[in-house]
Image: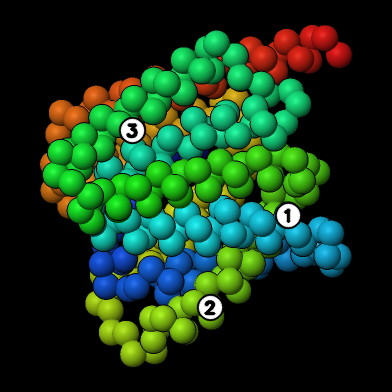
Amino acid sequence: MSWFILILLGAIWGSSYLFIKIGGAEIPPFTFVEGRALIAAIVLFIAMRWRGETLPRTRREWLPLIGMGIFNGVIPYTLITWGEIYISSGLAAILTAAMPIFTVILAHFWTHDEKLTATKILGVLVGFAGVIVLFLDEFARGLQMEFWGQFAVVVAAASYAIATLIARKYLQGVSHIVASTGQLASAALWMLPLSLAFDNPFALRPSLAAIGSLAILALLGTAIAYVLYYWLIEHTGATRTALVTYLIPITGVLWGAWLLNEPIKWDTLIGLALIIAGIGLVNRSASSQQTSNRATR
C-alpha cells in the first residue's frame, strides 16, 4: 500500500507542472497562485477541523508558518507559474527537482549536524552539472525569455530549499495538516493584494480548461498531495518518502510529453539523469550522516 501511495504521489506532483502550464497560459501568475493557495487552504482547513485540530493562536507560532507561506508558496508558486509561460512543463519539473541540492548547501551554514561531506559535495557538483546542461541551449542563444523562465524555476527550487530548513528548525512537533493549512492560508493572504493590484482578476475570462487545471492543481496537486505526503512520512518514515523526489521529474516529463506533446531532447535526458544522480548522492550521504549522529548520542 505504501509503495502505491508513493508512486501515486510522484505522479500527482509530476502532473502539477502540466496543470500549471495549461492554467498559467490564461490566468496571470499572481491570480493563479492566489486561487491555488486559497482553494487548497480551504480544503485543508475543513480536514483540519474534522480532525479536531485548530490553527495556532500566538504570534510566535505563526511566524514560521508565514515564512513557509512565503518560501514554500508565494515565491516558488509564482516563479514556476511565470517560468512555464516560456519553458515546457517537463523542463520545469526537472529544474525544480534540484531543490535537495540547494538544501544541502544551505543546511551546511544553517544547521549544526548537516555539514557538507565529500559525497555531498560530489552530489552538488553532479546536480549542478545537470542544471548547466539544461541551460546550454539558452546560453548559446543569449539571454532570451526562455533563459529567464528557466532561471525563475531554479530560484523557485532554492526557495523550496529554504522552506525545508524552516520546517526542520521551527515546525518540529507541529501537526502536519495544521502547518500545511497555515502556510497556504498565509500564502493566499500575501497573494490577494498582488492579484488585485496587478492582474485585474474580475475582468479575466479564462477557458474551462484553464479553470479546471487550477481547480485540479489546488485540490489534487496541493491539498490532497500534502495529505498523502504526510501520511507517507507517518507510516513509512522520511527516508522512504524522500524517494518521491526521484519520481517527480520523471513523471513531470512523461505527463508533458504525453498530453502536451512536449519534445524530449537529449540534453533534457542528460540533465535529468545528472540531477537525479546528484540527489541520490546527497540523500545517501545525508542518511549515513544521520545514522552516524544517532549512533554517537
The residue shown at (73%, 66%) is 49
Classify mark 2: residues with Cα within 10 Å, few (<14), some (14-19) or many (20+).
some
Give amino acid for label 1.
Pro
Q: Is residue 118 left or right of residue 267?
A: right
Q: Is residue 157 left or right of residue 42?
A: left
- Disc on res. 64: 1
Q: Please tell me in which quadrant of the rendered image residue 208 appears.
A: bottom left
The residue shown at (47%, 84%) is 196
Give amino acid for label 3.
Val
Q: Which residue is mark 3?
A: 131
Tag 1 or tag 3, which sits nearer the N-term? 1
Tell me the distance, in whole angstroms, between the alpha carbons under discs 2 and 3: 33 Å
Q: Which residue is mark 2?
A: 192
Q: Is residue 43 left or right of residue 276?
A: right
Can residue 13 be seen in the rendering of this structure? no
Can residue 217 be seen in the rendering of this structure? yes
Q: Please tell me in which quadrant of the rendered image residue 213 appears.
A: bottom left
Give amino acid for label 2.
Leu
Q: Nearer the viewer, mark 3 or mark 1?
A: 3
Tag 3 or tag 2, which sits nearer the N-term? 3
Tell me the distance, in whole angstroms, between the alpha carbons under discs 3 and 1: 30 Å
The residue shown at (69%, 44%) is 167
Tag 2 or tag 1, which sits nearer the N-term? 1
In-front residue for pair 102/244: 102
Tell me the distance, in whole angstroms, between the alpha carbons under discs 1 and 2: 20 Å
| SS class, disc 1 | helix
Place of residue 171 in the rendered image (x, y in percent of width and height, measured from the top left)? 75, 46
Please, is residue 111 above or below residue 20 in the view?
Answer: above
